[in-house]
Image (spheres, rainbow, N blue to C red):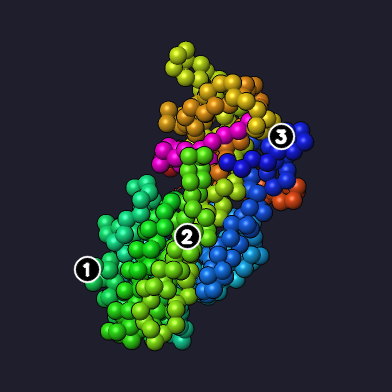
């Protein structure tokens, strides 16, 4: 893992000393290296430019959602995708151009569809027949003069080799219209018959934390076949192929992710080979990376507290956060690496299991990690926690979620405040029994 240190030998994030960040903003703290976020967005954009193909990079904001990230993504000229009214409202509050937002979800409510249309969201990615029906009635009764851009999400029948919970493109998936059984074609017919729906492309997403190009090559080939078949039969021209996200990242030194360039090259080469609609231009390619944009840019800082050594078994080192701010180890057996912020490069002197503070045995962030000697009060930095950490955080045990800092060129700035105890009781109401 890439580790930056300053003259004092301390870990730095975005040019800021991690110990100072912990002191100024307290722990647990999630810190993002903003330059790294920008660099990741640019690496995908540049890779498409190199391949001389028109493309849109859309950040999947479920990986980390806060006003600040939408602002950075907008500065980099990328789009975003959202999956709820909450994410959409946050993007809009951040000043994000609604035209560059795509709206996903496998059970969008009528109110959410209404909100998206009213806010003039760029694209609605239609997932199922129920949604299609809701959308058509809404347009008919409430927005009779409006046309909206849609994409159809299809289930391509491709299994990505990743964690079971992270697979979405296989046949047995809750997402999208199934191609093999003819659902996708039926959805196409329905959309083409409605003049208020402007179908601009086909969408598919095969999974997450994918470490090989094979799944994307199969996907592109499948979508090209589909586009060809639909052109032949319905004279429908596919202007956009949206391949979803899923590009894997390095969590520990044993992960060997591909680069943006490798993924993009494989995608574009397959497209050029498989695009058989010879009388129409190559479609524009959209991708939706979430993890690859923010995963490695995020670091979680914790303060070390208690230590328990069970002779000949293991040593638990407990930190002041855990499964409430990072559920991924408990949920997916995800692996992380940690360094001691005051001496990230110092030689290891102990092997510890980093446990969280939550009341659950499964609240272990890292099992068996080598570290230098530690003292209570030391700051431990768990690396690569930027994706699906804060965004999946909970208030289990009535513990507030951490603060989030953006660090860039040596300046740190709070972008999400720490959740305090009063915030936790904000929604509670006293229970008063009638007649007492
Ligand atoms: N597009 C669609 C339609 C998606 O469903 C997802 C992720 C993405 C893009 C972004 O995928 P990414 O590039 O981040 O892999 N909580 C899990 C990951 C769930 C991903 C859900 N969908 C985890 O922590 O591993």
Q: Position of residue 127 (x, y in %)?
A: 36, 67
Q: Is residue 379 left or right of residue 327?
A: right
Above or below, comparing residue 427 to residue 114 in the picture: above
Is label 2 in contact with label 1 (beta carbons under 8 Å)? no
Around disc 1, counting alpha carbons within 10 Å, would you say few (fewer than 14), some (14 to 19), or many (20 or more)? few
Around disc 2, counting alpha carbons within 10 Å, would you say few (fewer than 14), some (14 to 19), or many (20 or more)? many
Front one among 389 and 234: 234
Q: Which residue is mark 1?
A: 181
Q: Which residue is mark 3?
A: 10
Q: Which residues are magenta?
A: 324-340
In front: label 2 or label 1? 2
Residue 260 colored in magenta in the image: no
Quadrant placement of the C terminus: top left
Around disc 3, counting alpha carbons within 10 Å, would you say few (fewer than 14), some (14 to 19), or many (20 or more)? many
Q: Position of residue 38 (x, y in %)?
A: 63, 58
Tell me which label, 3 or 1, sits earlier in the chain.
3
Above or below, comparing residue 223 to residue 157 in the picture: below
Q: Is residue 337 visible?
A: yes
Above or below, comparing residue 263 to residue 143 in the picture: above
Indicate if the residue with disc 1 has its beta carbon within 8 Å of ligand 1: no
Q: Quadrant of residue 154?
A: bottom left
Q: Which residue is mark 2?
A: 263
Q: Is residue 104 visible?
A: no
Q: Could you give the CA–CA distance between mark 2 and mark 1, rounded to whole angstroms?
A: 30 Å
**Residue located 69% across and 31% down the image:** 342
Above or below, comparing residue 263 to residue 16 in the picture: below
């Amino acid at each position: 893992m890439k580790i930056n240190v300053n003259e004092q030998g301390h870990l730095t994030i975005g040019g800021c000393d991690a110990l100072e960040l912990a002191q100024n903003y307290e722990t647990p703290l999630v810190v993002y290296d903003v330059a790294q976020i920008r660099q990741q967005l640019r690496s995908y954009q540049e890779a498409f430019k190199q391949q001389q193909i028109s493309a849109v990079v859309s950040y999947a904001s479920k990986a980390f959602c806060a006003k600040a990230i939408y602002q950075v993504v907008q500065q980099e000229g990328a789009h975003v995708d959202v999956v709820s009214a909450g994410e959409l409202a946050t993007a809009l509050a951040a000043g994000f151009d609604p035209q560059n937002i795509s709206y996903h979800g496998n059970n969008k409510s009528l109110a959410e569809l209404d909100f998206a249309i009213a806010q003039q969201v760029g694209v609605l990615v239609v997932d199922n027949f129920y949604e299609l029906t809701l959308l058509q009635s809404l347009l008919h009764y409430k927005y009779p003069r409006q046309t909206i851009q849609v994409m159809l999400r299809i289930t391509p029948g491709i299994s990505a080799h990743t964690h079971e919970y992270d697979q979405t493109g296989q046949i047995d998936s809750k997402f999208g219209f199934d191609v093999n059984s003819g659902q996708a074609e039926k959805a196409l017919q329905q959309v083409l018959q409605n003049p208020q729906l402007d179908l601009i492309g086909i969408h598919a997403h095969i999974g997450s934390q994918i470490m090989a190009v094979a799944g994307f090559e199969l996907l592109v080939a499948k979508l090209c076949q589909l586009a060809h078949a639909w052109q032949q039969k319905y004279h429908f021209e596919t202007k956009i192929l949206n391949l979803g996200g899923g590009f894997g990242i390095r969590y520990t030194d044993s992960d060997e992710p591909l680069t943006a360039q490798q993924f993009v090259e494989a995608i574009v080469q397959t497209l050029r080979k498989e695009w058989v609609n010879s009388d129409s231009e190559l479609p524009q390619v959209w991708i939706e990376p979430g993890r690859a944009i923010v995963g490695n840019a995020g670091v979680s800082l914790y303060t070390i507290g208690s230590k328990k050594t069970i002779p000949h078994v293991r040593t638990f080192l407990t930190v002041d956060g855990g499964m409430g701010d990072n559920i991924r180890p408990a949920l997916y057996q995800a692996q992380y690496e940690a360094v001691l912020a005051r001496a990230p490069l110092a030689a290891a002197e102990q092997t510890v299991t980093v446990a969280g503070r939550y009341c659950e045995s499964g609240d272990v962030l890292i099992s068996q990690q080598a570290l230098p000697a530690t003292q209570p009060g030391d700051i431990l930095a768990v690396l690569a926690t930027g994706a699906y950490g804060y965004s999946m955080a909970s208030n289990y045990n009535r513990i507030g979620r951490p603060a989030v800092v953006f660090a860039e060129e040596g300046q740190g700035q709070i972008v999400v405040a720490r959740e305090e105890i009063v915030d936790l009781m904000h929604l509670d109401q006293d229970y008063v029994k009638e007649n007492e």
